[in-house]
Image (cartoon, rainbow, N blue to C red):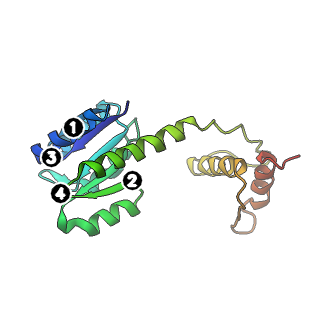
Amino acid sequence: MANILIVDDDPGISRALTRVTGREGQEGAFALTLQEGLYKVFSGDFDVVFLDINLPDGNGLNAMPKIKDAPSSPNVVIITGEGDADSAELAIRSGDWDSLRKPLSKEAIVLSFKRVIQYRKEKEAKKAPAALRLEGIIVNSPKMRQCYDLVARAGESESSVLISGETGAGKELFARALHEHSSRAG
């Protein structure tokens, strides 16, 4: 069962979405203001947040980075009115999950949260990457740790990898670590 939060200033839409998610066996909650929604996101454990863009106390697009920083790292589905298509496109480009246009259909809502839940299940089911052997690579910053995570994920796939950078950046060291972490290491 997934936890779903609806942040929309329209009580009718919020209650209807909560009922739809409940009928589908999910736990639903709603907030009518952005402030209340942020409070619930940070005090609860939500998998999906349906977020309206135009709220009485702020813009949902501006709150998305905060929502993503919540402990449960929920995926965001934008709910937009007829005139907000450009804002929804911007939201999706910034890494959010989906966009639904009002008036909302039950099928679109269910499909959207089921896709997010399936994605989250698959992400959790993936095994943790094996420890990388990082001879010669200095580990100091969060950006470098992100690089190591990318190397670990790339090593587990069969995809080709292009490593680029300035002279002396450590491309050869990363290439060696990637190779040793791959299935072709032997």
Tell me if residue 41 comes above or below residue 66 in the rendering: above
Residue 73: mark in rendering: none
Q: Nearer the viewer, mark 2 or mark 3?
A: 3
**Which of the 4 image quarters holds residue 35?**
top left
Mark 3 touches mark 1? (CB < 8 Å): no
Identify the residue position indicated by label 1 in the image.
Answer: 18
How far across and down, in percent of the image, does residue 5 sit?
A: 27, 39
Of label 3 and label 4, which has the lower sequence position? Answer: 3
Residue 103: mark in rendering: 4
Mark 2 neighbour density, 10 Å: few (under 14) some (14–19) many (20 or more): many
Mark 4 touches mark 1? (CB < 8 Å): no
Q: CA distance from mark 1 to mark 2?
A: 19 Å
Q: CA distance from mark 2 to mark 4?
A: 19 Å
Mark 1 neighbour density, 10 Å: few (under 14) some (14–19) many (20 or more): many
Classify mark 2: helix, strand or loop: loop
Of label 3 and label 1, which has the lower sequence position? Answer: 3
Q: Nearer the viewer, residue 109 or 135?
A: 109
Classify mark 4: helix, strand or loop: loop
Query: Of the residues shown, which amino acid type is indicated by label 2?
Result: Trp
Tell me if residue 148 comes above or below residue 61 in the rendering: above
Identify the residue position indicated by label 3 in the image.
Answer: 13
Of label 2 and label 3, which has the lower sequence position? Answer: 3
Query: Of the residues shown, which amino acid type is indicated by label 4?
Result: Pro
Query: Of the residues shown, which amino acid type is indicated by label 3?
Result: Ile
Q: CA distance from mark 2 to mark 3?
A: 20 Å
Query: Of the residues shown, which amino acid type is indicated by label 1?
Result: Thr
Q: Nearer the viewer, mark 2 or mark 4?
A: 4
Residue 97: mark in rendering: 2
Tell me if residue 65 comes above or below residue 120 in the rendering: below
Q: CA distance from mark 3 to mark 4?
A: 9 Å
* Residue extending furthest toward the right: 186
